[in-house]
Image (tube, rainbow, N blue to C red):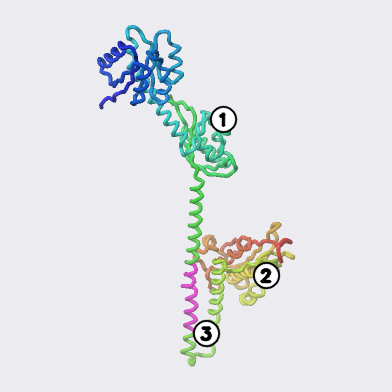
Amino acid sequence: METKRIKILYIEDDLVDQLAFKRLVREQQLPYDITMANSVKTGRDAFRSDKFDITISDFLLGDGTSFEYLPEIIATGTPVILVTGTGDEDVAVRAIKMGASDYVIKDVDFGHLKVFPLIIESSLRKQESNDKIKKLTMAVEQSSSMLFITDKDGLIEYINPRVTEITGYEASDLLGTDLILNHATLNSGAMICEITESLIKGEKWHGTTCHARKAGELFWESNTISPIYDNDSHLTGYIKVAEDITEKRNAELAVKKYSEELRDSNASKDKMFSIIAHDLRTPFNGLLAFSDILSNDYDSLSKDEVLEYIDVIRDLSHNTFNLLEKLLQWSRLQTGRMEFKPVKIPFQDIADNVTNLLKANAIGKGIRITGDIETELTVFGDPNMLNAVTRNLTSNAVKFTPENGAIAITARTIAADMAEITISDTGVGINSEDLTKLFRIDVQHSTKGTKGETGTGLGLILCKEFVERNGGKIRVESEPGKGSRFIFTLLLANQMQEA
């Protein structure tokens, strides 16, 4: 590899010293390209007209001293070696304070010239090291990442400007504070233990943490904390590099929320199409088939057969109408076109209305419906929605309860502003796997009743949406063979609500 040439500006007014230095360079075949100057003026002019790796300058020149131009040279970052006479050590000290790299004291035998190569090499290495430090310092100061440096006890010794820019905290707010404890306020104890254990093991830790800006606003960091070791592998401190990922995190959450909403929307459409394609088509096939029989074979049918087919058509028509009604309700709810008019309602009125409506179906199966409604319990909600929820759940109870079973509607206060309604039965119950499918639009789940009654599962989905629209929640408890308990909550009426 070719040796790099070193450009030297040598300012010396003694011709003998100039010649001696040239001879040294020639004899030792040193890779120096030398520019000579012999005065303050020529030295300054030479420096301004070219770029040099290093400057060697005598102190006392014919037209002044080197102090007249040294500050200019030093300011450019060019290493300077000052040459002084014996007894001028104070001058050398002044030069070092000004920023000179080194100094040499002349001797009559030109011995000082022999140390020039060593001092030049040392000064250039020192300058190279200083340049690296400056670059590193600039990189740290101008970094887009937040940087924290601590001592070996974890106390913060340095923060870069980005920390103040992101958090609002000045160096005076953070210096001397514990880096790890600064994470403890808004993050779990388990995370703090994880960070501490990693650093104790000499490992770096990477993760996401939450913090508060000085103004109080929360933000999120993606950060890495690493131990720092010296050349002898002794721990000297820790460094934390952090990025503010609040906007990125919020964007990801927004995308996730949108994806979930889109999935739910698609599931709703799929459910609608499934119901239209299957659950509506099936009863219409029956209606068409029995209508064709009555139309084509009426004269050959007995009176009992005609009545039987008419009963089937009636049942299919009722079931189809009920399904269409639910589909329209659900559609209006999804599109925001269903009116919501909450008022004060005595829950006893809802229970009585539902019981009277379903009494005939219950008697047909020998099922007893009882009520245990807390006296004067008044809820606040939309009457149509609350009646629909209670009616649907009670109708399901009748459907899935065998003959001679029992159904109970209970209502009680559970909090200052909340009532709990329970519709329980002694029916067939629901297994744990099917329980997870209830109330979900994205899962097709329907079970026939104890007498073959059919359904679509849409009723329970409507119940959930109606209950939640009225400020409540719904859940179910059930075991196969032990019946089911559908439980939902409603807001209690108070004096501030409009009747």
- Secondary-structure class at tag 2: helix
For the residues labelled 2 and 3, the Cα–Cα distance comes to 35 Å
Determine the main secondary structure of the stretch shown in magenta: helix
280 drawn magenta: yes
Which residue is labeled 1 in the image? 176
The dot on residue 350 is 2
150 drawn magenta: no
Answer yes or no: do the residues labelled 2 and 1 have beta carbons within 8 Å? Answer: no
Question: In x, y percent, where is residue 441?
Answer: 52, 64
Residue range in magenta is: 270-290
| Placement of 349 over or under 173, stated as above or below | below
Which quadrant of the structure image shows residue 395? bottom right
For the residues labelled 2 and 1, the Cα–Cα distance comes to 67 Å
Circle nearer the viewer, 2 or 1? 1
Q: Residue at x 38, y 26 (%)?
A: 128
Answer yes or no: do the residues labelled 3 and 1 have beta carbons within 8 Å? Answer: no
Q: Residues within 10 Å of mark 1 (few under 14, many from 20)?
A: some
Which residue is labeled 3 in the image? 309
Q: Amino acid at mark 2?
A: Ile
| Placement of 158 over or under 369, stated as above or below | above
Q: Amino acid at mark 1?
A: Gly
Circle nearer the viewer, 3 or 1? 1
Q: Residues within 10 Å of mark 2 (few under 14, many from 20)?
A: some
